[in-house]
Image (cartoon, rainbow, N blue to C red):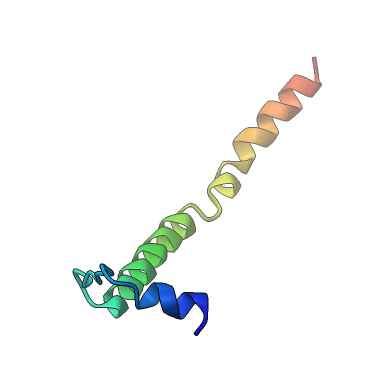
Amino acid sequence: MNAVEILANAEGHESFPLVIPAIAFAIIAAGFFTFLGLVTYSYKDVAARHRQKWSDASNHAAHH
């Protein structure tokens, strides 16, 4: 027997059941990361929408 088996079989070892099945944790995590991806995607090209404002400001400052 190795040390891991001895520790696993030690008396007083209690196992605690999960509140929800293990696959549910994976589904929740996947949903959360999908949500974060959608939030990140919603900010796509925000800087490009305001490119004209930034280029006008930089050209204006260059003429002084």
Residue in view at x 24 percent, y 69 percent: 14
In the rendered view, does 4 fall on the left or right side of 48? left
From the viewer's perspective, is residue 58 above or below residue 11?
above
Residue in view at x 50 percent, y 75 percent: 3
Residue in view at x 34 percent, y 69 percent: 31
Pick the residue in front: 57 or 7. 7
Residue in view at x 24 percent, y 77 percent: 21
Q: Residue most toward the bottom?
A: 1
From the viewer's perspective, is residue 16 above or below residue 62?
below
Please provide percent x and percent y for residue 62: 80, 23
Pick the residue in front: 1 or 42. 1
**Quarter holding residue 39:** bottom left
Label tally: 0
From the viewer's perspective, is residue 17 above or below residue 58?
below
Pick the residue in front: 15 or 13. 13
Please provide percent x and percent y for residue 61: 74, 20
In the rendered view, does 37 fall on the left or right side of 20? right
Q: Residue most toward the top?
A: 64
Pick the residue in front: 1 or 28. 1
Q: Residue most toward the right?
A: 63
| Screen quadrant of the C terminus | top right
From the viewer's perspective, is residue 34 above or below residue 50?
below
Please provide percent x and percent y for residue 63: 80, 20
Please provide percent x and percent y for residue 41: 48, 60
